[in-house]
Amino acid sequence: PAATIGEVLAVPLARPRRRVELSSDRTFLRCREAVLKFLYERHRFVEAAE
């Protein structure tokens, strides 16, 4: 496949992680926002190229 690494995101969250606790963790929410922003921007870039 022609897949490549688009961006490296450090995830400074201790393990093990508990999903319920992460839902209100500010660090998790910032990481989640960064991932979603990356995906939406990349999708927009791909749509523009078509």
Image (tube, rainbow, N blue to C red):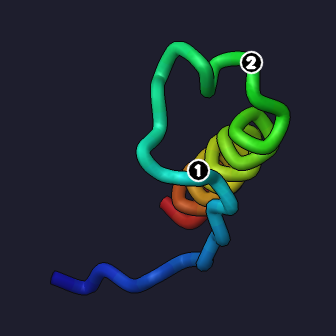
In the rendered image of this protein, does residue 23 appear above or below residue 5?
above
Q: Which residue is mark 1?
A: 39
**Picture residue at 74% right of the left edge, 18% below the top:** 24
What amino acid is found at the position of numbered circle 2 in the picture?
Ser
Is 38 drawn above or below residue 9 in the view shown?
A: above
Q: Quadrant of residue 9?
A: bottom right
Q: Residue at x 47, y 51 (%)?
A: 15
Point out the residue furthest to the left here: 1
Note whether 20 is above or below 38 in the view shown: above
What is the distance, in whole Å, between disc 2 and disc 1 at their CAs?
A: 22 Å
| Residue drawn at 75 percent across, 33 percent down | 29
Across and down, in percent, residue 17 comes to 47, 38
Give 48 or 17, whichever is nearer the viewer. Answer: 17
Q: Position of residue 10 (x, y in %)?
A: 66, 70
| In this picture, residue 24 sits left or right of residue 47 | right
Earlier residue among tags 2 and 1: 2
User: Mark 2 against mark 1, which lies toward the viewer?
Assistant: 2
The residue tagged with tag 2: helix, strand or loop?
A: loop
Q: Residue 11, how many percent across, how many down?
A: 63, 61
Q: Nearer the viewer, residue 14 or 4?
A: 14
Residue designated by label 2: 24
Q: Quadrant of the N terminus?
A: bottom left
Question: Which labelled disc corresponds to residue 11?
Answer: none
Q: Contact, CB < 8 Å: mark 2 with mark 1?
A: no
Does residue 5 appear left or right of residue 42 in this picture?
left
